[in-house]
Amino acid sequence: MSTSPIDAALNDLADEFEMLGDWEERYRYVIELGKDLEPLTPEEHSEENKVRGCASQVWLVTEPQADGTVRFRGDSDAHIVSGLIAVVLRLYSGAQAGDIAAFDASAAMARLGLSEALSSQRSNGLKSMVARIQRDAAALAG
């Protein structure tokens, strides 16, 4: 059985999280991931790119590629949220639009332990980010 790029990215993230052990270390790692996000331009910090349903400010840019894959970039005004964006982008950016739209994000977040580790507010924000990415991908997939 072949695995999709999203499944491969999830496996890699799960392995990395597993090696870190406790959630304090995982939080630090997630924050570090967020520091490596490609910055958005001031114009990209727009109302159009803003993700609704997040307590922090979150912006996502969706960039369809010629080969049918979708590239995502994002930013937040909160360090932990930037890290969560980085986790989501590792899963989805560069995957085929149809694969993104069909992927079970809830199961992925549960596998990473994010469902239990995040406050309900952060968890809802994460769900809003994923919903936005999947909605954009579904629109591109037709």
Image (cartoon, rainbow, N blue to C red):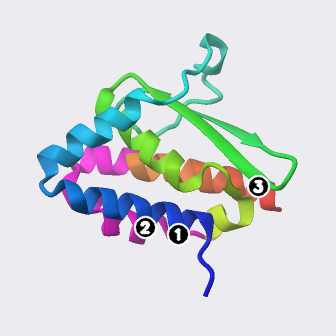
The residue depicted at 54 percent of the width and 21 percent of the height is 39
The answer to whether residue 9 of the structure is visible from this angle is yes
The x and y percentages for residue 22 are 12, 54
Q: Which mark is residue 7?
A: 1
Give the spatial CA distance, label 2 vs label 1.
6 Å
Q: Amino acid at mark 1?
A: Asp
The x and y percentages for residue 117 are 20, 54
Q: Amino acid at mark 3?
A: Ala
Question: Quadrant of residue 72 in the image?
Answer: top right
Q: Which residue position holds label 2?
A: 11
Question: Quadrant of residue 20 in the image?
Answer: bottom left
Left or right of residue 39: residue 98? right
Q: Mark 2 falls on what kind of element?
A: helix
Furthest-bottom residue in this view? 1
* Numbered disc in front, either 2 or 3: 2
The residue depicted at 65 percent of the width and 28 percent of the height is 48
Verify CB contact (< 8 Å) between mark 2 and mark 3. Answer: no
Verify CB contact (< 8 Å) between mark 2 and mark 1. Answer: yes
Residue 111 colored in magenta in the image: yes
Left or right of residue 55: residue 58? right
Question: Quadrant of residue 56 in the image?
Answer: top left
Q: Which residue position holds label 3?
A: 139
Residues in magenta? 103-125
Give the spatial CA distance, label 2 vs label 3.
27 Å
